[in-house]
Image (cartoon, rainbow, N blue to C red):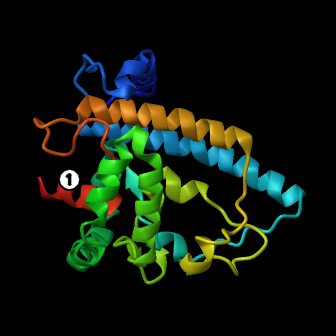
């Protein structure tokens, strides 16, 4: 496992050539699963600082954040991630801290997979094709309408909360949760808490995660393909199975 300075240097090298994130040039160094997980967790920690600043701004503006335990609509939305964040989840589930959550997940995964159907592969394929974003958005909405609860949701709470992906951390509804139901949200979305520094950070982090993904992806790793993000539950299950 790399120390903080070594990890920072690795991150700099991964982001100094845009071709690594685009998948048009192979990163020349070996990156293992722990490296990828450490990069994801470093990005998540940085995001938390930005979210704290955003929440403080919301407090000063008297905006009420309505997200809370038991509000599970977002957990019915398919979360698509790159390998680093899935590897962080898989590593935590293999630890003593995540043992109970791992048992829950492995028990719930088969029914989740059956209900999710072939929509998860379609989303992954479309998400990897930058010229088909409109098709991806339509496929994503159609999958959400199925209302398939995330296999990591246990009794209304996130069982992988300490290592949940950035997408699960960043989205907060404000004022009211009356529109937080899929049939309403797709027509009249809830008001989201926005903050330019967080939004810019999410873009930069996505580039780094994609570059890291491409550095460890490929047939020889048997995880996924270059530039192909996948459903969190599907990818974590595959990682736990190898």
Q: State whether residue 35 appears in this view.
A: no
Q: Residue furthest bottom?
A: 155
Identity of the residue drawn at 56% across and 56% down = 169
Q: Judge from the rendering whether residue 110 lies leftward or rightward of residue 7; answer left or right.
A: left
Q: Depth check: 7 or 80 in front?
A: 80
163 over 118 or under it: above or below = above
Q: Judge from the rendering whether residue 130 lies leftward or rightward of residue 25; answer left or right.
A: right
Q: Depth check: 112 or 31 in front?
A: 112
Q: Quadrant of residue 36?
A: top left
Which part of the image, by quadrant, shows the N terminus? top left
Q: Quadrant of residue 122?
A: bottom left
162 over 155 or under it: above or below = above
Q: Quadrant of residue 204?
A: top right
137 over 142 or under it: above or below = above
Q: State whether residue 74 appears in this view.
A: yes
Identity of the residue drawn at 14% across and 39% down = 221
Q: Residue 97's x, y, as percent?
A: 35, 62
Identity of the residue drawn at 31% across and 52% down = 124
Q: Residue 135's x, y, as percent?
A: 42, 54
Q: Residue 43's x, y, as percent?
A: 50, 39
95 over 49 or under it: above or below = below
Q: Which secondary structure, mark 1?
A: helix
Q: Judge from the rendering whether residue 76 lies leftward or rightward of residue 89; answer left or right.
A: right
- Few, some or many residues within 10 Å of mark 1 (<14, 14–19, 20+): some
The residue that mark 1 highlights is 239
Identity of the residue drawn at 32% across and 70% down = 101
Q: Depth check: 139 or 235 in front?
A: 139
Q: Residue furthest right?
A: 61
Q: Residue 17's x, y, as percent?
A: 42, 16
Q: How many marks?
A: 1
């Amino acid at each position: 496992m790399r120390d903080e300075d070594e990890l920072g240097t690795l991150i700099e090298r991964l982001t100094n050539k845009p071709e690594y994130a685009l998948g048009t040039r192979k990163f020349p160094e070996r990156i293992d699963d722990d490296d990828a997980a450490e990069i994801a967790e470093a990005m998540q920690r940085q995001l938390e600082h930005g979210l704290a600043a955003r929440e403080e701004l919301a407090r000063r503006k008297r905006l009420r954040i309505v997200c809370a335990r038991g509000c599970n609509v977002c957990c019915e939305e398919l979360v698509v991630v790159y390998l680093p964040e899935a590897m962080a989840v898989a590593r935590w589930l293999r630890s003593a801290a995540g043992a109970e959550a791992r048992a829950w997940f492995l028990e719930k995964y088969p029914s989740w997979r059956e209900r999710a159907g072939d929509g998860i592969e379609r989303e992954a394929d479309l998400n990897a094709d930058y010229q088909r974003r409109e098709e991806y958005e339509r496929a994503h909405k159609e999958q959400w309408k199925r209302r398939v609860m995330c296999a990591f949701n246990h009794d209304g709470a996130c069982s992988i909360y300490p290592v949940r992906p950035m997408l699960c951390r960043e989205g907060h509804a404000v004022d009211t949760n009356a529109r937080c139901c899929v049939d309403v949200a797709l027509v009249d979305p809830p008001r989201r808490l926005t903050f330019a520094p967080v939004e810019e950070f999410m873009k930069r982090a996505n580039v780094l995660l994609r570059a890291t993904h491409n550095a460890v992806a490929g047939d020889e790793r048997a995880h996924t393909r270059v530039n192909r993000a996948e459903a969190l539950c599907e990818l974590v299950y595959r990682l736990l199975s190898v």
